[in-house]
Amino acid sequence: MKAGKTSLADLILFKAGETKKAGSTDDQTSTLDVDDDEKEQHHSITSHICHFEHNNARINLIDSPGMPDFMGYVIGALRAAETAIVTINAHVGIEVNTRRSFHHADTRGLARFIVIKKCDEANVDLP
Ligand SMILES: Nc1nc2c(ncn2[C@@H]2O[C@H](COP(=O)(O)OP(=O)(O)OP(=O)(O)O)[C@@H](O)[C@H]2O)c(=O)[nH]1
Ligand SMILES: [Mg+2]
């Protein structure tokens, strides 16, 4: 939760040349968190899909909410995905939804990779 999933997606879209500036959930400029409630509360409430080009391939990216209440959107997104990116907040470590999402992706036989965010925060103790 709040590990930085939407920020990562916004940055990928910028690096891929899809947007002129990396959007931010902090200042309501995210390309993904576009619903009024998401902007107001600064967290994703539903899944949003975007796409970018890489090596002549079109990559579809689904950003899903991290709050446990919205886990259904994660499960739905995994049904449409080939690969799952599980984002971990280095400051707080592995959370309940981290395990659940990883498990659901495994159950569906998806390739998974882990992105560790917020390594720059104070008191982060990486092994
Ligand atoms: N210090 C630091 N802050 C980050 C990093 N990535 C994201 N953030 C901040 O973390 C907060 C939450 O980022 P989001 O991208 O909205 O997090 P999320 O995982 O999409 O959150 P939910 O949709 O609520 O699950 C924002 O204030 C971001 O600016 C990072 O690598 N380092
Ligand atoms: Mg989000």
Image (tube, rainbow, N blue to C red):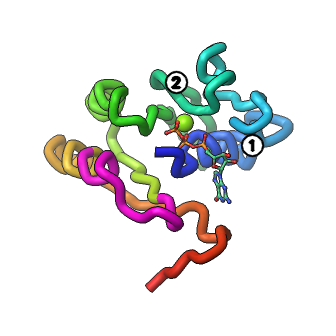
- Rendered-image quadrant of the C terminus: bottom left
Distance between the alpha carbons at the discs numbered 2 and 1: 16 Å
Foreground residue, 56 or 68? Answer: 68
Residue placed under numbered mark 2 in the picture: 48
Mark 2: secondary structure: strand
**Snapshot quadrant of residue 37:** top right
- Horizontally, is 11 left or right of 82 in the view? right
Q: What stretch is highlighted in magenta?
A: 89-100
Ligand 2 shows up in the quarter that is top right
Residue 101 seen in render = yes
Instruction: Identify whether 115 is placed above or below 62.
Output: below
Local packing at callout 1 (Cα closer than 10 Å; few below 14, some 14-19, many 20+) is some
Q: What residue type is labelled 1?
A: Phe
Residue placed under numbered mark 1 in the picture: 14
Closer to viewer: mark 2 or mark 1:
2
Does the magenta-highlighted stretch encompass residue 115?
no
Instruction: Identify whether 54 is placed above or below 75.
Output: below
- Horizontally, is 81 left or right of 64 in the view? left
Residue at 52% across, 24% down: 48
Mark 1: secondary structure: helix
Foreground residue, 63 or 99? Answer: 99
